[in-house]
Image (tube, rainbow, N blue to C red):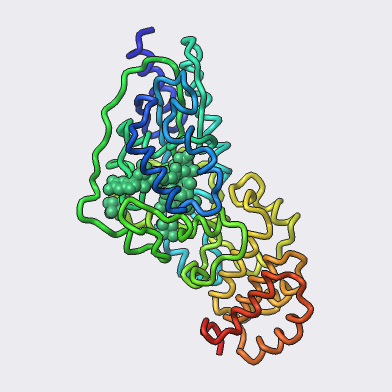
Amino acid sequence: MTPQALKRALIKRAEAQGFVLTRVTSAVLPDRIARDLADFIGHDYHGEMGWMAETQDRRDSPDHLWPEARRAVVLAMSYAPLDPPLEGLARTGHGYVSVYARSRDYHDEIKGKLKQVAAVLASAQAQVKVFVDTAPLMEKPLAQQAGLGWQGKHTVLVNRQQGNWLLLGVILTDAELPVDPPETDHCGSCRRCLTICPTNAFPAPYQLDARRCITYLTVEHKGPIPHEFRKPIGNRIFGCDDCLAVCPWNKFAVDGQAYRRQMRDDLATLPLGEMLALDDAAFRQFFASTPIKRTGFARFMRNVLIAAGNSRDSTLVPQVKACLDHAEPLIRGTAIWALAQLLDPKEWHILRERYQSLEPDLTVQAEWLSISDPEQGLIS
Ligand code: B12
Ligand code: SF4
Ligand code: SF4
């Protein structure tokens, strides 16, 4: 088969698997990308994602990860939601789950489909490796170089027809497939994604300080969430979609059907009272095979407690109070903050007198102390 015919067969198989975009680029990224990655890590924007720094020398270009790689086939699956997702932010008694997480884990979902596409290359005796956010690979710069779209000012890939509700997958191969031209930037003077960000996570257009991003804070960050972010988090209990949802290029996006088939509508907004009632086993069962399960019970409850604190819903108080006796310090500590939002200061001080002297964990002690600090102004 000629390289052109092989590429056509690849695209046909990708379309059959539900990918909305499939393009090919060189497996070499320019030095500029390596410098941007070094800058990102040098500024500590990766926070606790130490794996980004550890793999930096392989991550900056696919041929550093796999020297035989000649081409990167970059594919996108649309997960464009049917309804405007940010409406869920107004339902303060419910936790908001970002759109990508309302389904079976996309890593599993897309990897299976990528393997089906890669089989076309394998059957032509080419070597292949498939990736969905599973290896040190810079998928967005590769996608831009392949012409799938451009990295918008929010750093996420945007396509003129599909918008930015896209999940990316990559197949590296030693086959010499014909390459596609790169895409250019179409953000123009727009700044919508930058101004809507609740936590000011963009130090400049096209740059993200992950440590300030609600997705990082609710999904990747392990310990207590810094106080300054707790109110801006609102009811977002897993991820955030604000910068994606406001992008004007989404108005042309129509094609999320392939992904939607395995989405769980019951995960869009979750009643906080029901979430507070979960124990570890019930959590695992309810979120089985979703990305939420990977954060683990303690981090999830930390997020739910922040949303409960922000809900101003006093009917949640008994459940939040019960968390003060939880074996997990992260849960006890966040419950202290949530109660400071929900209770009258006098009632909160009574609890502090009862619990603080008995508290063995230093991070939880710090919560009692930080909230009673008048400088913080969190309670009277
Ligand atoms: C780490 C990571 C995160 C981190 C950091 C995000 C980030 N922007 O880096 C956190 C946890 C915050 C995160 C959040 C999300 N993520 Co994420 N994440 C990744 C991961 C694993 C690596 C990204 C990476 O390499 N970051 C490092 C920095 C250096 O890369 P960068 O953003 O491309 O940086 C560029 C710019 O800074 C630019 N730059 C720097 N200076 C300047 C100056 C100028 C003038 C210009 C033009 C450019 C420029 O150059 C850099 C290199 O191109 C990828 C998967 C993968 N392996 O690629 C998924 C990935 C990026 N995430 C994805 C998704 C869906 C999300 C969320 C939307 C999920 C959600 N709804 O909650 C949010 C989006 C938040 C946001 N605005 O980015 C998708 C994005 C798909 C797409 N359409 O682009 C990916 C590709 C996963 C996938 N396989 O689909 N994610
Ligand atoms: S996902 Fe949310 S918190 Fe993160 S950069 Fe976008 S708007 Fe900001
Ligand atoms: S919202 Fe505006 S600035 Fe942000 S990515 Fe979309 S077009 Fe670019």
Residue 366, position in %: x, y? 65, 74
Outermost residue toward the left in this view:
189
Above or below, 380 against 224 in this view is below
- For residue 227, side relative to residue 162 (left or right): right
Above or below, 117 against 240 in this view is above
Residue depicted at x 50% and y 36%: 136
Q: Nearer the viewer, residue 137 or 338?
A: 137
Residue depicted at x 55% and y 79%: 312
Q: Nearer the viewer, residue 356 or 347?
A: 356
Residue 174, position in %: x, y? 44, 16
Image quarter for residue 321?
bottom right
Image quarter for residue 276?
bottom right
Residue depicted at x 57% and y 57%: 221
- Any part of residue 289 in sight: yes
Placement of the N terminus among the 4 image quadrants: top left
- Any part of residue 260 in sight: no
Residue 228, position in %: x, y? 49, 71
Outermost residue toward the front in this view:
42
Residue 177, position in %: x, y? 36, 17
- For residue 10, side relative to residue 189 (left or right): right
Placement of the C terminus among the 4 image quadrants: bottom right
Quadrant of ligand 2: it is bottom left
Outermost residue toward the bottom in this view:
346
Q: Nearer the viewer, residue 118 or 142?
A: 142
Give the number of marks. 0
Above or below, 15 against 189 in this view is above
Outermost residue toward the top in this view:
1
